[in-house]
Image (cartoon, coloured by chain):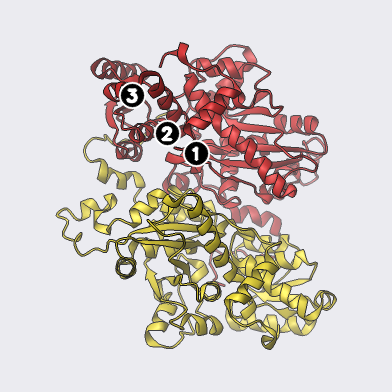
Chain colours: A yellow, B red
Amino acid sequence: MDLSKCPPLTRVSVQEAHRRIEPYIHRTPVVTCQTINTIASTPQSERSENRSATPNGTHALSDARPKVKLFFKCENQQKIGAFKARGAFHALGRLIEEDGIDEVRRRGVCTHSSGNHAQALALAAKQFNVPAHIVMPSISTPSKIAGTKSYGANVIFSGSTSDEREAVIQQVIKDTGATLIPPYDHPNIILGQGTQALELEQQVEDLLFRDSSLGVPGKQKLDAVIAPIGGGGMLSGICTALAGTGIIVFGAEPNFEGANDAEMGLKQGTRIEKVKTLTIADGLRTPVGEIPWSIISDKTKLQGIYSVTEEQIKSALRLVMERAKLFIEPSAAVPLAVVLYNEDFRKLVEEQAGPGGWNVGVILSGGNTTVEAIAKLFAASESSEERAQGTVGIDGERKAENVAG
Amino acid sequence: MDLSKCPPLTRVSVQEAHRRIEPYIHRTPVVTCQTINTIASTPQSERSENRSATPNGTHALSDARPKVKLFFKCENQQKIGAFKARGAFHALGRLIEEDGIDEVRRRGVCTHSSGNHAQALALAAKQFNVPAHIVMPSISTPSKIAGTKSYGANVIFSGSTSDEREAVIQQVIKDTGATLIPPYDHPNIILGQGTQALELEQQVEDLLFRDSSLGVPGKQKLDAVIAPIGGGGMLSGICTALAGTGIIVFGAEPNFEGANDAEMGLKQGTRIEKVKTLTIADGLRTPVGEIPWSIISDKTKLQGIYSVTEEQIKSALRLVMERAKLFIEPSAAVPLAVVLYNEDFRKLVEEQAGPGGWNVGVILSGGNTTVEAIAKLFAASESSEERAQGTVGIDGERKAENVAG
């Protein structure tokens, strides 16, 4: 994909991208959850699960008191289970327009990925009957290999270092002439990922038109959107989509083992190029790409990035599952974790939004995990029964037995 | 609630119930999942996860080959996380109409439940500012006690046997004059629970009008609905709602330790009054109530009840979470388990639907479970990676490590 032929990184280009991919993707639902709104709008020290930790309420005065109504964009229910389908369909669609379908079918497309981008490109290629060569580390999880193959892609295995992957992908390009579709560091990918923000913006207006009580008083639209950032394709796409609308964009990152490379990069004024972390938010382990960086480091497009701990991600993940009843992967819980637990973010919202509060879009980026992976995350954790016990006090005689009724 | 004042158990009464409760409940979404449709329409022995188990394909010829498109009614996203909100709002609304709001507020309402009905009645009572007294076994899970109290209900503890609960509830009625709102064995509850079928019927027609590819070829509406049965309030309500529409209704039950009391009762022609089971589908451990029985044992209203094993329930639960990305409780997975794994049911669909297939509504009745409970169910199970490995064959070098990208 020739960079010089790419559309400019503007809202209008995202709108064009949306028209191009609309027939092939899901317009994923936007859902609200009153319980989570209430928790998010309560100072941390006053929440019931924390009451026993702050017996004299000394924290309460300093804790932020933002008022928010949250609108969850369910990209976990997107095709292939994550937003990545958007960028893949857009990049392939543009390539076909530039070079013609016959030429693209003759050469094919390729990428390297062990995750959602592999399946997304495989699905898009299948739709247009284009050969897809996907380089995957041989240690990739078998279900993802099987998923990619199930769309008819040619899976080629490599070692797991970036040098090893690079060598294999170069060989594939040399052998087949396939066009590389990168996972995030490309304008066509960025424009595709940005399309979810256009839907979210419109869906929230529609929801508030039908039932204004879903939002904060007197507002008919979104005030802000918060999205996860790994390679930055999605966050920079959302920034591009919403530029000039007045809707403020924030990024959310894990901070385990330096996974908050984007947050730290913004602080020091230069992009951090290498990250080595095993955060549970496994979709966010990559450093920000060059083109996404050029967008998110523009203060007129992104207001800031905030990070959270592994435990905060787990708490947000639990709430989305147990309260909103949605099945998501850990990466998708990171933005809600910022809204619930990052005091810097919460103070900012309290100050900027004022007593009226904000309508905040929260991107649930994907749902590609397994019940076993969830079991591993929560098997040894303090149970919600035990946490609830804190609020139940002495009334409940606690036993393990289940009772029907 | 005077039985003689209850509306007749007809579709028109369910429609009236729906108008009454609509302002207070969610019109829960209906979702489809292509992957699950494909699995459900594939003979069991030809599914990839079973291939290694049937190396010579001998099962394939005898296995049923139904064609189905499924429409999931997401009552897991109903208020209080389960369909029970419908019956509680309807029963209380009717009571207020019969006796007047002042009288109902003076006397209050009461029930005994350790589960979703307790929270549902507490929520409905709070809405109308009516005192609610809820008798709960002292061994109830603390989160459910806390949930019930959070709606302002007066929780009274009892022993866990039905005699002990009955004694306490009689004392509460004597002391307060509160009106008993039973969990399922009452016409007003049955009519309320039936309202979800009216929404499902209309929502499927709307979906198929916009995108006919979501359904089987040439059909604009539902052919059948399958719902779980415990006490039978919901299933009998759905039968009532759909009577005369031509939409066929089926029930789904666990068969662990005799939990399939309704299925066995229909076979022997008499209601089974006692059940003692610890099936993981803990919402379905109760025997069918008398009034629900009178409806579901009418062959013109219910075509049949089918049961499944604990492992089949777990498999269906996994698919709803991992593929449809919805968080549900085990009871809610039972109907899908029947569609996927009960050969009697599958043969019936194959025969009755023919090669064109059926559009089938599947009730996801609730989502009130915890990540720890899910962890317990799947911690020791064969992982999906291992199962996927069966289809991946010799390509994948299997290691536990995770890779970003």
Lateral position of residue B116 relative to residue B266, left or right: left
Q: Which residue is mark 3?
A: B110
Q: Residue at x 47, y 57 (%)?
A: A71
- State the mark number for residue B366: 1
Label 2: which residue? B116
Looking at the rendered structure, the secondary structure element under dot 2 is helix
Where is residue A12 drawn, in percent x and y?
A: 61, 75
Q: Does residue A93 show up?
A: yes
Residue at horizontal 75 percent and vertical 44 percent from the top = B42
Label 3 element class: strand
Query: What is the chain identity of the residue bearing mark 3?
Result: B
Q: CA distance from mark 1 to mark 2?
A: 9 Å
Q: Is A111 above or below relative to B361?
A: below
Task: Name the quadrant containing residue B115.
Answer: top left
Mark 2 is on which residue type? Answer: Asn
Q: What amino acid does circle 1 point to? A: Gly
What crowding class fits label 3: few (fewer than 14 Cα within 10 Å), some (14-19), or many (20 or more)? Answer: many
Task: Check disc 3 and give the amino acid type.
Answer: Cys
User: Marks 1 and 2: CB-CB under 8 Å?
Assistant: yes
Q: Earlier in the sequence, mark 3 or mark 1?
A: 3
Q: Nearer the viewer, residue B6 or A110?
A: B6
Query: Which numbered circle lies on residue A394?
Result: none
Closer to the eye: label 3 or 2: 3
Rounded to the nearest angstrom, the CA distance separating label 3 from label 2 is 14 Å
Foreground pick, A272 / A276: A272
Asked if residue A388 lies left or right of residue A190, the reply is left
Percent position (x, y) of residue A247?
46, 70
